[in-house]
Image (cartoon, helix red, strand yellow):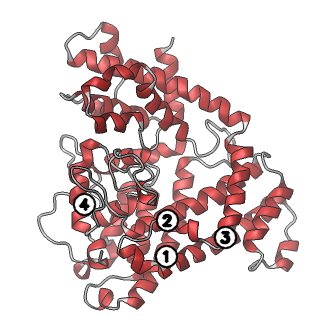
Amino acid sequence: MTWEQLLSLKRQGDTSKRLRIEQDDTRLGFEVDYDRIIFSSAFRSLQDKTQVIPLSKTDFVHTRLTHSLEVSVVGRSIGRLVGKKIIEKYPHLSAVHGFHMNDFGAIVAAAALAHDIGNPPFGHSGEKAIGEYFSIGKGQQFKEHLTPKQWQDLIDFEGNANGFSVLTSSRPGIEGSLRLSYATLGAFTKYPKESLPKKPTINISDKKYGFFQSDKDFFKEVAEELGMISNKSGEDIGYERHPLAFLVEAADDICYTIIDFEDGINLGLVSEDFALEYLIKLVKDTIDAAKYQTLTTKEDRISYLRALAIGNLINDAVRVFVENEEAILQGKFHFALTDKSKYKAQMDDIIKLSVKNIYQSREVIEKELSGYQIINTLLDKFITAFNNNHEGKATNYDKLLLKILPEKHHLEKENLYDRLLHICHYISMLTDGKAVELFKIVSA
């Protein structure tokens, strides 16, 4: 892979080249990507979607929106630091093509901002609830009517693939959805493969999948424009990652490791003593002991350690990327950057404690259980109504229910797979609160 291709400014539907050297630096294309994401309705819905604690009414607990903004900020820093090194190593990128180090930061910031945009309500349990509706629930009836890959899309419903669809799928009058640059779409796609074969290798890019069958043709266009390396044969589609996807992933890993932990501390799920012990291991080389001693509140002490920890992890992620940059460009680096971090053991300790005390806390489990019932009920009601309407046998109840669908979801879908995915997409875009409200209406 070459940076000249990987930094493509092309957008869906373009008929001519967009050259970086001809860009207006006051309105750079990669920064336009960021703006389009932040003004989208899908991004706004993240303000009422679970990050750690579902349906939490506590004002300091992170939602998907605040998490996404923080990942974007961290991603921008990592991207700029890496960009500085890349421009120094390949000066022609600047001298001939006009790229700046901040371009790398802008691409990673935009992709990181969108990294959770396809996630359903109720966190990762929402993905599982959609998948299990098809694999072990009433949705099993559709299996014999779908191809194996279409079926896998549904039973392993994936927020990353749904996010790619949110960012790129056309509807009448809106071609290409947000029409982001291909560089940003490449950096967004952590898992550039189809749902099958499932986890064919230990390569990090094969861990999950990144696009639905309905979006595979466009993804192939993006990957080929960017010069991404194909790593599948025959009819299977899969590629080595866009290098900047490693930076988006690192920003997410850093934020959820440290900031979810901070939420657990503020909620009283992790004691301050444990928190200090774990965080100080990350910052022992950079902490200003005199300054730390002046902090009198738990919140200030934890905030100080959190900021130092994130800074150290950013610098180490940059180090790992730069040291492995040539292998990454050749598609021969198959790990998350944090897997090769000198702080990996400390991060693993924090994650282990978070799983025990936060992710598996009674409050989280109870609300995830509610989420399962809510999502299963909504899927069943709307899929039944949507299919009945298509087949010309809609009941009055079905017709009333379909009137609840937002206007942009009133689309004809001839193909069963498209209809099922359409309703899954609608349910996935609901906020936690809206899903609860709809559930109460349809269950009354």
Give the foreground label among 4 and 1.
Answer: 1
**Label 1, label 3: how far apart the Cα atoms are:** 15 Å
- Whichever of callouts 1 and 3 sits on the residue coming sooner in the sequence is 1
Residue at image mark 2: 335
Residue at image mark 4: 222
Front residue (pair 275, 57): 275
Relative to 90, is 176 on the left or the right? Answer: left
Residue at image mark 3: 343
Q: Position of residue 350 (x, y in %)?
A: 71, 57
**Quarter of the image that includes the N terminus:** bottom left
Front residue (pair 22, 319): 319
Residue 321, numbered circle:
1
Badge 1, how many Cα within 10 Å: few under 14, some, many 20+? many
Q: Residue at x 29, y 78 (%)?
A: 2
- Whichever of callouts 4 and 2 sits on the residue coming sooner in the sequence is 4
- Whichever of callouts 4 and 1 sits on the residue coming sooner in the sequence is 4
- Whichever of callouts 3 and 4 sits on the residue coming sooner in the sequence is 4
Give the foreground label among 3 and 4.
Answer: 3
Relative to 277, is 66 on the left or the right? Answer: left
**Label 2, label 3: how far apart the Cα atoms are:** 15 Å
**Label 4, label 1: how far apart the Cα atoms are:** 23 Å
